[in-house]
Image: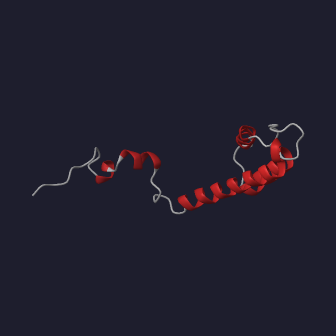
Amino acid sequence: MRTPPRGFDGGLADLEPPWRRALGGPFCAPGRATSYFYGYTRLSELRKDAEKQMGSRFGAQKFHDFILAQGLLPPALLRKAVLEQFVNSETVGTKSR
């Protein structure tokens, strides 16, 4: 009878595929996929709202630069920043907080 191969520390955990170890896998942390999807949908809605309000003044690159310049913010505060500073600004794409 053959024994299964062991990892460096003698456990089977080291035999997990490298991509799963690197990414953590979608099922490693409960709620990970849900929180990612929540953020994705909020950001998509925010972009659509900004495009609708700005019309031809909207620039995708400037929008993304503004979002990144804000740093880590909860979705509600990010929305407030975009609608107050990005959409209503005369010079679209200012990087103020």
Quarter-wise, where is residue 62 in the image?
Answer: top right
Q: Quadrant of residue 67?
A: top right
Locate the N terminus and report the quarter of the image it occupies: bottom left
- In this view, which residue lies farthest toward the left? 1
Q: How is the image coloured?
A: secondary structure
Total labels drawn: 0
Q: Position of residue 76 (x, y in %)?
A: 76, 57
Quarter of image, res 66: top right
The answer to whether residue 69 is above or below residue 14 is: above
In the image, what residue occupies the spot 68% across and 54% down?
44
Counting from the top left corner in percent of width and height, residue 89 is at 88, 42
**In this rendering, is residue 8 above or below 33?**
above
Nearer-the-camera pick, 83 or 49: 49
- Look at 69% across and 53% down and name the residue there: 43
Place of residue 31 in the rendered image (x, y in percent of width and height, measured from the top left):
55, 62
40 w.r.t. 67: above or below:
below
Locate the C terminus by quadrant. top right
Residue in the picture at 21% in, 50% down: 5
Q: Is residue 92 left or right of residue 62?
A: right
Left/right placement of residue 84 relative to residue 2 reads: right
Residue at the right extreme, as displayed: 90
| Residue 92 in the image, given as x and y percentages of width and height | 83, 39
Q: Which sits in the foreground, 9 or 52? A: 52
